[in-house]
């Protein structure tokens, strides 16, 4: 009761959660703002139509509307409705309710999934942790309340593609024109409710090239330590969104600028402070950005193998220098780094398995004698391991000659492969494959995208000829 009284007092001063509610929205014609229903996916249109025919409100909402207004092609579409998750589930045969803290419905149309959420209410007595993070959020409300609950003004736009209407409760259209990122409501309170919103600030600024509203930016550096309270599985999801945004390097720079980097991946921060580590990570993320912008898929396992290679390599080197056998030393280094990182970031088991295989293949690429090269051609992770090898060469960690040899060997005929192995043996290039001291990157050498291994395509068949 005392808490509710305090909330009411804060609301009168314009700081409480209900102070952000605006009952009346500005209404625009979508066509007048350059938005046409043909730009919305058929799955999203069918979802809205089905809900509306059943007597419910249904609006395309969030990033899809934002991107349409910016002239961008949305990656996906979300729908907001006054129907409860159970009512939505009853209308769509291929659908399922997911989430506990924030229940939504996934409606499936072939390969496309539409995320349908019910309008959320603003709660004066929402269950929170000791830092103010909302723990459960399944109280349904009105559209004005739902708009006030969304994170940024540019994401609180509702589009009815069948009626050609856009509703704007918080001047999101104005902020889009100004290219300004502004949070809805009191910034400190909203960031405490969900610290992930601070990470989204960095992602949207990097991705869209927007500036941060001064009031939105003000509390971020002070509240940055709250990032450490985000559940590790959710933190992994947000980290992945940052890294596959097509602007990964810009995202990392923005995280560091706002003081948000330390709670996300402390090990990565240490890597970036080392010249060799920074060069390797920069090369990896530049490649990732190129793939994303070219419309290619990304393998999370390959991506995180790139980010965490430096600490694995350093531990491997120290163990070998101390006299430990090469392969066991690498395996132990991998276990140690993955165990340390698991405390901050819940990398899924399948991704960790991919990372381990990519790393364990590396010493085998340096053994170019006998049957080893032929055996590698049959390995299910050849392509991923090869792409990682080329990344190491391009970052200056290994000689360009090694990468060029493998590129030639993979495309060669049986006779040419035998000659390549003989030549490597004559030149003494059949070493044990241990960690090496870094070499300077050769000048004048450029290399095209190595293929689809970064997307997780294992396919040794193409390499095997």
Image: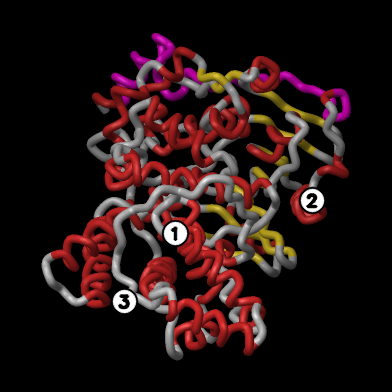
Label 3, residues with CA under 10 Å away: few <14, some 14-19, many ≥20: some
Tell me residue 388's x, y (percent): 48, 63
Instruction: List the residue tagged with mark 2.
Output: 41
Q: Is residue 108 left or right of residue 306?
A: right
Evaluate if marks 3 and 2 touch, with contact meaning CB atoms under 8 Å apart: no
Q: Is residue 306 above or below residue 19?
A: below
Residue 61 or residue 420, whichever sits in front? 420
Identity of the residue furthest to the left in this view: 322
Tell me residue 85's x, y (percent): 58, 55
Q: Is residue 121 left or right of residue 337?
A: right
Residue 10 covered by magenta stretch: yes
Identity of the residue furthest to the front in this view: 426
Q: Earlier in the sequence, mark 1 or mark 2?
A: 2
Instruction: List the residue tagged with mark 1.
Output: 399
Q: Is residue 258 above or below residue 130?
A: above
Residue 197 or residue 397, whichever sits in front? 397
Residue 199 covered by magenta stretch: no
Give the foreground label among 3 and 2. 3
Specify the segment rendered in magenta. Answer: 4-32
Residue drawn at x 58%, y 77% is 409
Q: Earlier in the sequence, mark 3 or mark 1?
A: 1
Quadrant of the rendered image containing residue 2: top left
- Mark 3–mark 2 distance (CA, rounded to whole Å): 54 Å
Quarter of the image containing the C terminus? bottom right
Q: Is residue 119 left or right of residue 281?
A: right
Identity of the residue furthest to the top in this view: 13
Instruction: List the residue tagged with mark 3.
Output: 432
- Mark 1–mark 2 distance (CA, rounded to whole Å): 48 Å
Label 2, residues with CA under 10 Å away: few <14, some 14-19, many ≥20: some
């Amino acid at each position: 009761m005392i808490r509710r009284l305090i909330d009411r007092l804060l609301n009168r001063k314009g700081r409480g959660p209900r102070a952000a509610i605006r009952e009346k929205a500005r209404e625009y014609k979508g066509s007048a703002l350059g938005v046409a229903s043909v730009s919305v996916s058929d799955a999203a249109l069918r979802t809205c139509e089905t809900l509306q025919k059943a007597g419910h409100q249904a609006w395309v909402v969030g990033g899809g509307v934002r991107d349409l207004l910016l002239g961008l092609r949305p990656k996906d579409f979300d729908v907001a409705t006054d129907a409860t998750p159970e009512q939505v589930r009853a209308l769509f045969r291929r659908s399922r309710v997911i989430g506990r803290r924030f229940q939504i419905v996934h409606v499936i149309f072939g390969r496309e999934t539409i995320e349908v959420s019910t309008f959320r209410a603003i709660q004066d007595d929402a269950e929170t942790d000791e830092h103010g993070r909302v723990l459960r959020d399944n109280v349904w409300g009105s559209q004005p309340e739902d708009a006030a609950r969304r994170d940024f003004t540019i994401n609180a736009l509702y589009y009815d593609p069948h009626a050609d209407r856009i509703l704007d409760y918080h001047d999101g259209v104005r902020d889009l024109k100004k290219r300004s990122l502004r949070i809805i409501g009191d910034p400190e309170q909203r960031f405490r409710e969900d610290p992930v919103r601070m990470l989204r600030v960095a992602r949207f600024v990097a991705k869209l090239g927007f500036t941060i509203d001064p009031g939105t930016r003000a509390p971020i550096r002070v509240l940055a330590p709250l990032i450490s309270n985000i559940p590790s599985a959710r933190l992994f999801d947000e980290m992945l969104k940052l890294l596959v945004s097509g602007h990964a390097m810009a995202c990392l720079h923005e995280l560091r600028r706002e003081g948000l980097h330390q709670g996300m991946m402390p090990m990565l921060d240490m890597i970036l402070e080392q010249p060799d580590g920074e060069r390797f990570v920069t090369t990896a993320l530049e490649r990732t950005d190129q793939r994303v912008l070219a419309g290619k898929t990304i393998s999370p396992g390959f991506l995180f193998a790139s980010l965490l290679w430096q600490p694995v390599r350093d531990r491997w080197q120290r163990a070998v220098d101390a006299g430990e056998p090469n392969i066991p030393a690498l395996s132990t280094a991998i276990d140690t780094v993955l165990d340390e990182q698991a405390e901050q970031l819940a990398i899924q088991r399948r991704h960790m398995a991919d990372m381990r295989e990519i790393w364990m293949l590396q010493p085998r690429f340096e053994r170019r004698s006998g049957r080893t090269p032929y055996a590698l051609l049959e390995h299910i992770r050849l392509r991923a391991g090869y792409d990682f090898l080329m990344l190491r060469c391009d970052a200056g960690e290994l000689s360009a000659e090694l990468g060029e040899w493998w590129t030639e060997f993979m495309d060669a005929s049986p006779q040419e492969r035998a000659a390549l192995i003989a030549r490597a043996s004559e030149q003494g290039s059949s070493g044990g494959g241990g960690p090496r001291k870094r070499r300077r990157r050769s000048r004048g050498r450029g290399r095209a995208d190595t293929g689809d291994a970064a997307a997780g395509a294992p396919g040794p068949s193409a390499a095997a000829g």
